């Protein structure tokens, strides 16, 4: 056994996630001198007033905050400035602020680049997680207010080798677009990098492409999940990851394997996307022989496959096998027992995505964002009073 102090130092923070991580993307374009969040928000509101998007009265602070991806404090300061400049009336109790004047200045047309944002998905549209659909819905509403459109582009062929010719065709079909790359390979990211096409990655970009990105901090999350199960007495834990080369999967594996603890024995199970083949892979591992007592799922669809496999094999959750999910989707609320999972703040993620798109279109410096979801305990993990001995 390790000394108590050493054990405490090693694991005393496994039940807590570190604060969210933000990294700077080295863009050649910096923020305009003197420009602030308030001044940008005021400019956007004036554009909407001139273009007639607001009629008679201003929307409420909450609605403006969501639409402009700005904090409530910034919205209040911007509205106060518009009031001082004579655009809107002072607030009257709970009534909407009246619009006094818009402007005699002509509305400046948006450049072609700012009229369309394309969401390129290598995952079939039908398989996109619900949480991503929520982001897209909120993003589409925000872009519509800006006079822009969101277009979904399904490119299941993007995971194959040599996608250059098809990507060239996409560029021709969607000229002047800003792109969001979802679950794309290194080859696809490098192609956009070479072409200098404005884009960001909804996921993790590869070091070779160095594109700006927004994603869950998978490496930290997987390590935290291993530590959480370790504290519950589990020593032989398996990480179930997709059989894919996506960088996020590699980061999950690195974080999971980096956790250290006495008698901790990690396993990695590469799960096929097909449910039957996934069950066969779990059977091949033979949990009884390996002594695995807990599984970590990294995809919501994978979680359903694991639960179905456990039911078929008459393995009770959590009595015989504990289950922890790194992701959460609304339909998992209908699964019993309730699954212990990590949940991402959808609105916060969407606001960051909108800000990154705005910075990209305005040629400002972009900060990469790594989101750390919250752990929501369920009833799918058992506590082992006496950890099983090593076999």
Image (spheres, grey):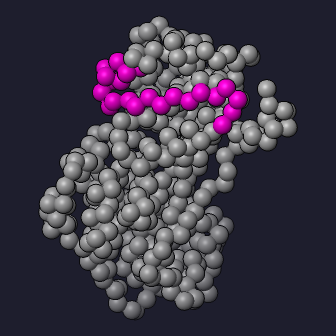
Q: Nearer the viewer, residue 294 or 267?
A: 267
Which residue sits at x=75%, y=40%?
10
- Per the rendered image, the range of residues in magenta is 260-282
Which residue sits at x=41%, y=79%?
363
Q: What quarter of the picture does the C terminus occupy? A: top right
Q: How many marks?
A: 0
Residue 202: give x, y in percent of width and height: 41, 55
Residue 246: give x, y in percent of width and height: 37, 47
Q: Answer with left or right where residue 80 lies relative to residue 181.
A: right
Q: Nearer the viewer, residue 382 or 285?
A: 285
**Quadrant of the image occupied by residue 375:** top right
Which residue sits at x=35%, y=40%?
244
**Quadrant of the image occupied by residue 129:** top left
Residue 67 in sight:
no
Q: Is residue 194 above or below residue 329?
A: below
Residue 199 in sight:
yes
Q: What quarter of the picture does the N terminus occupy? A: top right
């Amino acid at each position: 056994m390790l000394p108590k102090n050493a054990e405490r130092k090693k694991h005393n923070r496994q039940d807590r996630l570190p604060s969210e991580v933000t990294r700077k993307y080295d863009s050649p374009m910096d923020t305009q001198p003197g420009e602030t969040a308030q001044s940008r928000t005021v400019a956007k509101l004036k554009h909407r007033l001139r273009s007639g998007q607001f009629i008679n009265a201003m929307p409420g602070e909450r609605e403006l905050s969501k639409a402009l991806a700005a904090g409530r404090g910034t919205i209040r300061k911007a509205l106060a400035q518009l009031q001082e400049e004579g655009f809107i009336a002072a607030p009257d109790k709970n009534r909407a602020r009246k619009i006094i004047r818009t402007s005699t200045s002509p509305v400046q047309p948006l450049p072609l680049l700012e009229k369309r944002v394309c969401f390129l998905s290598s995952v079939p549209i039908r398989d996109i997680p619900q949480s991503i659909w929520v982001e897209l819905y909120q993003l589409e509403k925000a872009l519509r207010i800006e006079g822009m459109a969101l277009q979904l582009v399904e490119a299941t062929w993007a995971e194959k080798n040599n996608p250059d010719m098809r990507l060239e065709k996409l560029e021709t079909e969607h000229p002047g677009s800003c792109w969001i790359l979802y679950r794309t390979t290194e080859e696809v990211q490098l192609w956009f990098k070479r072409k200098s096409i404005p884009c960001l990655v909804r996921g993790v970009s590869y070091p070779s492409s160095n594109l700006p990105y927004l994603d869950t901090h998978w490496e930290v999350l997987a390590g935290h999940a291993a530590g959480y199960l370790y504290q519950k007495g589990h020593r032989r834990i398996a990480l179930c990851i997709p059989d894919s080369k996506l960088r996020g999967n590699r980061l999950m594996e690195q974080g999971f394997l980096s956790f250290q603890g006495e008698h901790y024995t990690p396993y990695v199970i590469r799960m096929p996307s097909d449910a039957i083949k996934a069950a066969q892979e779990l059977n091949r591992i033979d949990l009884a022989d390996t002594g695995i007592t807990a599984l970590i799922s990294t995809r919501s669809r994978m979680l359903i496959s694991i639960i179905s496999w456990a039911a078929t094999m008459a393995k009770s959750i959590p009595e015989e096998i504990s289950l922890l999910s790194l992701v959460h989707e609304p339909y998992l609320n209908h699964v019993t027992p309730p699954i212990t999972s990590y949940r991402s703040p959808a609105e916060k993620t969407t606001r960051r995505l909108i800000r990154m798109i705005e910075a990209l279109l305005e040629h400002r410096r972009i900060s990469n964002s790594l989101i750390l979801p919250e752990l929501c305990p369920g009833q799918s993990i058992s506590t082992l009073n006496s950890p099983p001995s090593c076999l």
